Amino acid sequence: MNRAVIEALELIYPSDRLLTRDVELLPYESDALTAFSAVPGAVVLPINEEEIIDTVRLCHQMALPFVARGSGTSLSGGSLPIPEGLTIGLNRLNRIKKLDPEQRIAVVEPGVINLHITEAAQPYGLYYAPDPSSQSICTIGGNIAFNSGGAHCLKYGMTSNHVLGLKVVLADGTVTTFGGESVDGVGIGPDLVGLFVGSEGLFGIALEITVRLMPQPELYRTVLAAYNDLGAAGDAVSMVVASGLLPGAMEIMDRLAIKAAEASVQAGYPDAEALLIVELEGEALQVGAEFDQLLDTIEESGAFEVRVAQNEAERTRIWKGRKGAFSAVGRLSPDYIVQDGVVPRSRLGEALVQINELKEKHQLDVANVFHAGDGNLHPLILYDGREAGALEKAEALAGEILALCINLGGSITGEHGIGMEKRDYLPAMFSEEEIDIMQALRRAIDPNEIANRGKMFPGGEAPALSQHGMHPLERAGLISRE
């Protein structure tokens, strides 16, 4: 990064919050898609929105590309640095500025951890519904960028369904607000909140987010069903939905994922080819009536064992295994790719059979963990990045899984976004005209394309492949995978 830019940044940030040395930049070279890395020119750590605004305006004036970063949990390379660009770390903007239990809203800064909102709201009998697996570490700013979902998005929707208002700084330095603190304006005029949420940082940075809170359910009934066939578990999801039930969550884990979760958190899962977790929640009278219907449907689906959580401790243990499955798979393989395709629920069983055929074709292990209720697949493709060509082989399988999702009438992403990983697959889902419209909209807001440059759209500079698929900290000798 040239000296003029550094000197301009020094007018905004003290030396301890302006990082330029190689050792300081190392932790920012990758996000959770650690197979790829890039070295930012500098990293800044603002502590208030004024510093963010000043920084974005400086980037606009100097045509300096920037990336906003929270906890770096993106699995699509969405927060991968731009080589010689600026990374703006938002973790220190972590205040819950307002919590109004009567209006059921919270106003938060972008660096607030997802789970911390629920923890703050619990004394008032409220919680924040979107619950991605990384909710204990991911930030609301990142959730906004990728429209995160989670296990309970089947019933309650994605992040976009829970954001009422935004204060943002656009890529040209303009500060504006979308929405407000109530639903009164919803449906009036263009949905600018919906436009910004899920835009993957291409429009600017959210400075302040107003989210709606939900009343905590009166009763949960959590059912764990074990199957001898993964396809049968997928078909069971369609049966539950066809019965007219709308559970709070429906999740599936296959044998490899079960093995990893057991080794990690000792959840006490049955020995099975697949597990289906179904959770009913709501008013006690309603849940009680639905519970009998659910058990009948599960029995009809061919489950060989059915368990019902008898208390909160058992419910927590079931979900601890599912929530920790992604990280637990690291016990089975030194590296893995987390894919994020979507298929119609009615074709879920078919998709799982095809994924099994593809893994046999490529001779790679795949651990399946996914939000079964809305058909959001999360196949984890296992490989060893220390072996020559292993990453490319895994990526080839990942690409075929995305292709089958499209062929089955689905999508290439459910909640992880396009980022760097899937941008070359965008034309398989959208026409050239549709992509041109998206890019024209982006340029109308960010004419210089400095906000998260190179992400989402095909073409542009390719990300650097980490040496033998190694994490930057491993490459530097700071961690080891012996």
Image (cartoon, rainbow, N blue to C red):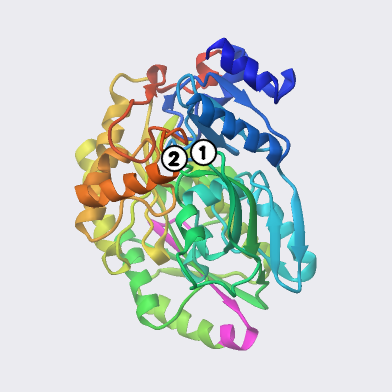
Q: Which residue is mark 2?
A: 446
In the image, residue 146 sits, relative to residue 183, either above or below, namely above
| Residue sitting nearer the eye, 262 or 441 | 441
Confirm or deny contact between disc 2 and disc 1 (CB under 8 A): yes
- Most extreme residue toward the right is 123
Residue 379 seen in render: no
In the image, residue 392 sits, relative to residue 364, either above or below, namely above
- Taking the spot 61% from the left edge, 31% from the top edge, the residue there is 55
Q: Which residues are magenta?
A: 270-288
In the image, residue 187 sits, relative to residue 43, either above or below, namely below
Residue 372 seen in render: yes
Q: What amino acid is found at the position of numbered circle 1 in the picture?
A: Asp
Q: Which residue is mark 1?
A: 172
- Taking the spot 38% from the left edge, 76% from the top edge, the residue there is 241
Residues at marks 2 and 1, CA–CA distance in whole angstroms: 6 Å
Please say whether residue 287 is one of the residues in the magenta stretch. yes
- Taking the spot 57% from the left edge, 55% from the top edge, the residue there is 268
